[in-house]
Structure formats: C-alpha cells, structure tokens
Amino acid sequence: MHQVTELIYVHDPMCSWCWGFRPTLERLRGELPAALGFRRLLGGLAPDSDQPMADEMRAHLQATWRRIAERIPGTTFNHDFWRVCQPRRSTWPACRAVIAARMLDSEAEDTMITAIQHAYYVEARNPSDDDTLVALAAQIGLATQPFATRLHAPETQAALAAEIAESRRIGAHSFPSLRLRIAETYWPVAVDYNDAAGMLDLIQQLLDG
C-alpha cells in the first residue's frame, strides 16, 4: 500500500506569526521534494465572540505585532487597525471563510488566506466581521451569495471542528506549526521564520530515514 508522506501546515488566517512566516513558508514549499504532499490544517485560534476585545488582549497583540516586525524583517502591520476597527477575539469566522472558499473552488484556499491576511494586517479591515469576509470573497472572484450561505452552514463549522481536532491530535497546539507525516508518524519540524534551509534539511533527513 502506498505510504502517505506529506508536510502539514497548521495555521490560522488571523494568526500574526503565521502572517510573518508566510514568505519563508512559500520558499519552503517551493523547494520541497516533488513527491512530498502539502496540506493545510486550520488550528482555530479563537472561537466565535461578539464581545469587544479586552484592553489587556489589545495591548498584548499590539506588542506582538511590534515584536514580529522586529524579529521577521519585512513584515508589515498597519496599526491603524486598532483605531478604526472594533477588535474581537474571534478568528473562527475567518477560518470558516477559508473552508467556504475551498468548498466553492478548490483553488481558492490560498487566495482567501492571502486576502484575509492582507485585509487585516495591511488594510486595517476586520476579518472577524462577516461583511469583510463576504467582500473579500467577491474580491477574489467567488459568488457572494453561495459564499455567505456556506460561511454559516453547519457543515462548514463541522469541517472546522474536524480540522481543529486533527491539529490537536498531531500535537500542534500553537501556530504556525509544521508536522511531517510519514505513514502514521507525525514528526515536528521547528518553524524558522527567516530561513527555509534548516527546515528543508530536517525534512530530507526524516524522509531518508
């Protein structure tokens, strides 16, 4: 029987460290062995909430954005977000938007992730809000009514719950995380935010056994 080998990327579209990691992740993906599969799993950072974000969390996240910009050169954050938006600690809507986009078009997953990240971190728009997510769907060429319906469909939430459960099962409790799956064994690959070389070396060593 064919042995499954794949690199699993566990993320959340509203995870600021995932935004910082994106350029290096793209370099990593571009250099992976051709036979190695690649799959994303949504980790579901923060469940649905209609409550304004607490001041302590707002301050923590703003400090995190500044720390990421220092640690990962070239990472852009628009701090106007904290002035012009009403932040909520709620990333599941954005996660469901990624699933809804994928359901409507198998090629739209990465495009939707990019659109959410760019809206949040560069354009100071709030991806916790449905109207933002529907506008982003239209922006990337998806039909808005089917997208809006799927955004709140029970099967979309069920798919998110299944991805969160799988993420936990393979030991990914923080984001971003990488796991190399070889058959039924999941090897952690430590994330290097600035350099793909070490991750590639470890992946190749594990594949070589």
Image (tube, grey):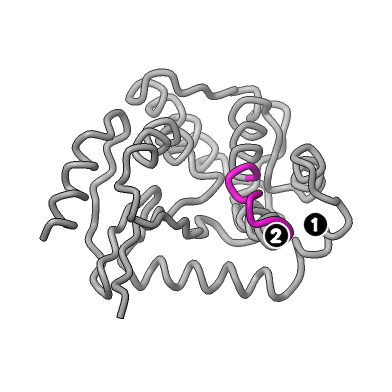
Q: Which mark is residue 125?
A: none
Q: Quadrant of residue 192?
A: top left
Name the side, left or right, on which 4 lies relative to 81. Answer: left
For the N terminus, which image quadrant?
bottom left
> Label 1, on which residue?
147
For the C terminus, which image quadrant?
bottom left
Position of residue 4 relative to residue 112, above or below, is below
- Residue range in magenta is 104-112
Q: Are marks 2 and 1 in contact (CB under 8 Å)?
A: yes
Residue 93 x/y as whole percent: 67, 56
Position of residue 77 relative to residue 96, above or below, is above
Residue 160 x/y as whole percent: 58, 67
Amino acid carrying label 1: it is: Phe
Q: Quadrant of residue 54?
A: top right
Name the side, left or right, on which 119 lies relative to 146. Answer: left
Residue 46 x/y as whole percent: 54, 57
Local crowd at mark 1 within 10 Å, few (<14), some, or many (≥20)? many
Please tell me which residue is depicted at 71% across the width and 39% down the height of the picture: 86
Position of residue 3 relative to residue 70, above or below, is below
> Label 2, on which residue?
100
- Measure how far apart labels 2 and 1 are at the Cα level: 6 Å
